[in-house]
Amino acid sequence: EDKVVQSPLSLVVHEGDTVTLNCSYEVTNFRSLLWYKQEKKAPTFLFMLTSSGIEKKSGRLSSILDKKELSSILNITATQTGDSAIYLCAPNLYSGAGSYQLTFGKGTKLSVIP
Amino acid sequence: SQTIHQWPATLVQPVGSPLSLECTVEGTSNPNLYWYRQAAGRGLQLLFYSVGIGQISSEVPQNLSASRPQDRQFILSSKKLLLSDSGFYLCAVRGGLLAQETQYFGPGTRLLVL
């Protein structure tokens, strides 16, 4: 059975702090790993990682994949209150005939206080 | 770019009543479509996916069903709702040619079964 574990489950930090969110996975037919941000609505896409060791960066957010360790991290520097959200990790699995399926972790709930 | 519409946005239904949630997509043709449910305290769970009209794959046995009567329309239904069907229902579409391994989510429907 495919398994995705995110840690910590929740995190409270002060504005300006740097945080690291973790995702580990045990899945079959792994193709890539996606990160999403979910506020009080639908998840929005952040990153897709396909190669080990290559950092993807967008502003204060960055992420990297380690295929050997079956894990990924999401870093947020100089956090702001607007970063408060649930961050979801989702390995992308190839399901045949050109189809892909995402398997989601339960997420890390980040709360940034002023 | 693709746009996903879902309705209704919120719904309160009694146990045993029927359900019909609709998802429509604009800006793409022959999309891969997905239904997810996010229950309180749980991760996003894939319910159904469809690679074309009339083609539905079910991931989790339950009292829900899905149909795809038109290329860009995906419907989630139930004949008799259970309390455990409460949750946040999200429709997703697979990305276009340059983002085939990415999924983008619609705004979602919050369902409360009483």
Image (spheres, rainbow, N blue to C red):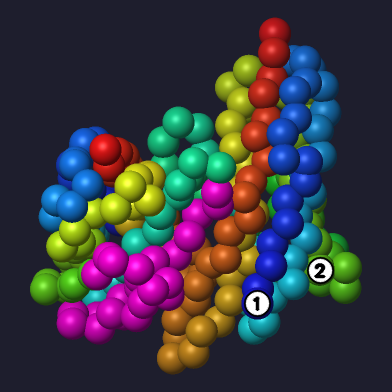
Asked whether B64 falls inside the magenta stretch, the response is: yes
Three-letter code for the amino acid on which mark 1 is drawn: Glu
Asked whether B104 falls inside the magenta stretch, the response is: no
The percent coordinates of residue B91 (x first, y second) are 33, 56
The percent coordinates of residue A11 (x first, y second) are 75, 30
Three-letter code for the amino acid on which mark 2 is drawn: Leu
Q: In which quadrant of the rendered view does residue A110 lie? A: top right
Q: Is residue B99 above or below residue B9?
A: below
State which chain disc 2 sits on.
A
Segment colored magenta: B42-65
The residue lying toward the viewer, choosing from B93 and B85, is B85
Q: Give residue A69's mark.
A: none
Q: Is residue A110 above or below residue B58?
A: above
State which chain disc 1 sits on.
A
Would residue B13 be found to the left or right of residue A39 on screen? left
Q: Give residue A1's mark.
A: 1
Residue at far top of view:
A114
